[in-house]
Image (cartoon, rainbow, N blue to C red):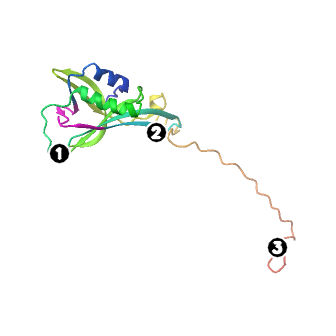
């Protein structure tokens, strides 16, 4: 799977601002659009802090736009971009969104398990701005830094904690011959 270059919130929003009168559509799979009756139910800002298998701390922010399609609601056209921008405006008045946050779109329906996906391309097609969504992929940050994941050619594992050498303890016999405690001697 090709790794996508993530779109940040500023780039995403700037693209919307440039096309307020277009219909806003989301393509969640090849040839499959989110139903036109969708709602933007919430926008979440998720600061994430993690430690990867190589022992490196990572931090980033995700901005997650959640889409929901109500049952038994028919609509021929998707919401206009300006409607989405009005929802974004309400959110940003209460929650300043990190302009560098990575954008994800959260969606699912009866045929497609709910998941968070990256906006891939944002394409103008006639009267619509269609945002093509692609799934996230699991990755090893150690590899992306030029390290390895698993066992290297020396047999060292990046994902296993370093085994500290156990200290050697020298045992000394503290009992002097004849001065040991025996049952009934009264020493205990």
Of the pair 60 and 156, the residue shown nearer to us: 60
The quarter of the displayed image where residue 130 is located: top left
Please name the residue shown 49% across and 41% down the image. 159
Using a 10 Å C-alpha cutoff, classify the residue at mark 2 as few (fewer than 14 neighbours), some (14 to 19) or many (20 or more).
few
Q: CA distance from mark 2 to mark 3?
A: 54 Å
Q: Which residues are magenta?
A: 26-41
The quarter of the displayed image where residue 76 is located: top left
Query: With 148 as the anchor, is 65 left or right in this view?
Result: left
Quarter in which the N terminus is drawn: top left
* Residue 40 magenta: yes
Q: Tag 2's secondary structure?
A: loop
| Residue 34, visible in the rendered structure | yes
Which numbered circle lies on residue 71? 1
Q: Which residue is mark 3?
A: 181
Q: Which residue is mark 2?
A: 150
Outermost residue, bottom direction? 184
42, above or below 86, in the image: below
Q: Tag 1's secondary structure?
A: loop
| Residue 8, visible in the rendered structure | no
Of the pair 154 and 179, the residue shown nearer to us: 179
């Amino acid at each position: 799977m090709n790794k996508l270059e993530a779109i940040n919130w500023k780039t995403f929003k700037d693209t919307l601002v440039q096309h307020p009168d277009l219909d806003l559509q989301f393509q969640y799979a090849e040839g499959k659009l989110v139903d036109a009756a969708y709602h933007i139910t919430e926008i979440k800002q998720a600061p994430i802090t993690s430690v990867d298998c190589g022992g490196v701390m990572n931090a980033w922010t995700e901005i997650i736009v959640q889409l929901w399609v109500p049952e038994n609601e028919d609509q021929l056209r998707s919401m206009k971009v300006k409607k989405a921008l009005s929802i974004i405006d309400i959110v940003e008045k209460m929650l300043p969104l990190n302009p560098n946050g990575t954008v994800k779109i959260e969606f699912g329906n009866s045929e497609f398990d709910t998941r968070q996906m990256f906006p891939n391309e944002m394409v103008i097609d006639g009267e619509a701005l269609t945002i093509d969504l692609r799934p996230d992929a699991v990755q090893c940050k150690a590899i992306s830094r030029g390290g390895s994941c698993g066992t290297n050619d020396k047999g060292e594992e990046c994902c296993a904690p370093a085994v500290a050498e156990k200290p050697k303890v020298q045992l000394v016999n503290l009992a002097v011959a004849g001065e040991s405690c025996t049952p009934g001697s009264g020493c205990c």
